[in-house]
Amino acid sequence: MSTMQYQNWRLEIDKDQIAWLFFDKKNAAINTIDQHVMHELSAALDHLEKNHAVCGLIITSGKTTGFAAGADISQFKELKDTEQATTLLTEGQRIFNQLEGLKIPTVALIDGFCLGGGLELALACRYRVAEEGVQTKLGLPEVKLGIHPGWGGTVRLPRLIGPLAALNLILSARMMTGRAAYKLGLVDVAVPKRQLIHAAKFFILQQPPAHHETALQSLLQGKIARQVISVYLRKKLRNLMSPSHYPAPYQVIDNWETMGVLNHAAFQQEAKSCGRLFFSETSQNLVRVFFLQEKLKSLAKDIAYQPTHIHVIGAGTMGGDIAAWCALKGLTVTLQDLEPRSIASVIKKAHLLFKEKLKESYLIQRAMDHLIPDMAGQGISHADIVIEAVVENLAVKQSVFQSIEAHAKPSAILATNTSSILLSEISTVLNAKDRLIGIHFFNPVHKMQLVEVVSSDVTSHQIFNNTISFVRCIDRLPLPVKSSPGFLVNRILMPYLLESVAMLNEGIPMTAIDQAMLSYGMPMGPLTLIDAIGLDICLSVADYLKTYSNTAIPQRLIELVKIKKLGRKTGEGFYRYNQSGKRIQSEKTRYTRSLTEISDRLIAAMLKEATACLNEGIVENSDFLDAGMIFGTGFAPFRGGLMHDAAARNKIMTPTTLKH
């Protein structure tokens, strides 16, 4: 066997004269693609073009972390202008065209992540062989960064699986398993890990016909079909996002409608439009959000703590969802509650979550086996972490923690999922106050990435570090915050929600209030959000926070709670809902003033409280604050964060006056 070593690639030729090109980026835990990686790939391909003895090429990873996670995002910051970006993309296309043009058969052997530029590399191969398990993920997530694939992905993928499936995959940024990719036609075969090498060599030695789009899919590439499909896709997209907020998905549709995918001009158009998008405000802000996410992930990188057993007390909405999520992530979970019906409800709901996330019956059963009913609380004495998730009542929580401390092992983390109560108040009943920490999840747990890790002045440094590590173990983003009323996210969010109710009292139509924030880029309006949370819960949190702040509680909120109009869960709050929880559309009230006046006032309410949080040191810096609001509330990601957007637009940090 002969070997040629590059800095990021290793080329080996086996006894069957098959070339194996291993991607193993130097000094990196995962493979990402940068200019140097691409230049070395081109050099390796040059070498293979001259070696006429080689009968085929298999490209795979030299790392256990996956095939390739995509482009090196840090290089985005080095781009100076659109011309430089377009040139870089065009060069990448040339190299992948070089790979596609090899006369020998080529196989991408995919085990683990194969995303973005990594998948575009695989698409340039004649065949793709993927590991079938859930750890293998394929996708083109570039629209999450405000751009679209630029190394040929928007051209090759529709040729392979047809335009509808391809555009759906690109526009949704969806990731899929190897098995799902096989069903779609994205890979030629999905096999267990032990069969990957054999399968890859089969395609080199046997050279079966490569997969292509069907005749029907090919018909959809025609000009008239492209026009009809493009109208449909744009209409569908507008229900999800505005083209002014997220232009990249619309640009993908425009490119396909205009150029199709059957000529070289399609590649040129792809590079030009992607190059322009790099410098859009949306892309700049979404790249910022990406690095905020990476910063939160990195908080646990030097911590070796690996819990195996979690005990959750309280099988309500939050406790049940926390338990289910931890079980999904492979931890043993014992779930305690006084009511067997509550635990049974959690088990039923968890099964639906596992079916959605895991698909395979044996994986679903494995997750179910991790979730153990425990009415007697026997799991407390064995658990590495005990999480209290009972009713938001100080006396009840204190009683629970007295019992926990008496039975938990000395090394166990004692955690509360309280959304607002101070740790110092809960810990008055504890002997070892330094063991208590807040682990505040957001609802719904399976969708919201953020977890506030709340520490007090006496919380042990080791407990804090281990909790950060636990949050990353379950694939969530830890945000360190100091214990204070409402912590960070709820404290900033509550004035915003209460201000929206105050505006309603002034006679501003609720549809105008909600529409103003939807136009701003929020995932839902503030009044809709209150209905989703529950008016009683919002009132309870507001009532607790008013002890520590000057925020007034609007009478309208108090009155609705008194008459049990609590939001979606009771069928009526600010809006009315049917039995399935879907909002019953109400007539829109005419509003002639600017919606921007409404959004400015509501954002100002958040900014005022956010500034106070920074001044009080509740969170380390404005970047962490922005991350908290984006990943904890869904604050418009394309704006780059609350404080970032304020700085960019020079927002006045005091509420404006808006009277009806």
Image: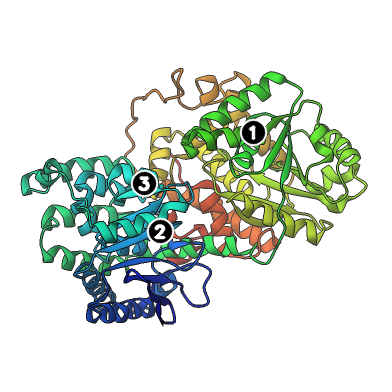
Q: Nearer the viewer, residue 537 or 125?
A: 125
Q: Is residue 395 above or below residue 451?
A: above
- Name the N-terminal-most of marks 1 and 3: 1
Q: Quadrant of residue 382?
A: top right
Q: Nearer the viewer, residue 540 or 73?
A: 73
The amino acid at mark 1 is: Asp
Q: At 34% from the left edge and 30% from the top edge, which residue is drawn?
A: 589
Q: At 19% from the left edge and 47% from the top edge, which residue is drawn?
A: 162
CA distance separating discs 2 and 1: 33 Å
Callout 2 secondary element? helix
Q: Nearer the viewer, residue 167 or 640?
A: 167
CA distance separating discs 3 and 2: 51 Å
* x and y, in percent, of residue 571 in the image: 50, 20
Residue 625 visible from this viewpoint: yes
Q: Mark 1 = which residue?
A: 369
Check the picture and name the quadrant holding the N terminus: bottom left
Q: Mark 3 = which residue?
A: 519
- Name the N-terminal-most of marks 3 and 2: 2
Check the picture and name the quadrant holding the C terminus: top left
Q: Is residue 368 above or below residue 121?
A: above
Q: Quadrant of residue 391?
A: top right
Q: Mark 2 = which residue?
A: 197
Picture disc at residue 120: none
Viewer-side label of 1, 3: 1
Give the image's coloring scheme: rainbow
- Name the N-terminal-most of marks 2 and 1: 2
In this rendering, position of residue 656 left or right of residue 115: right
Q: At 21% from the left edge and 58% from the top edge, which residue is drawn?
A: 156
Callout 1 secondary element? helix
Mark 1 crowdedness (10 Å alpha carbons): few <14, some 14-19, many ≥20: few
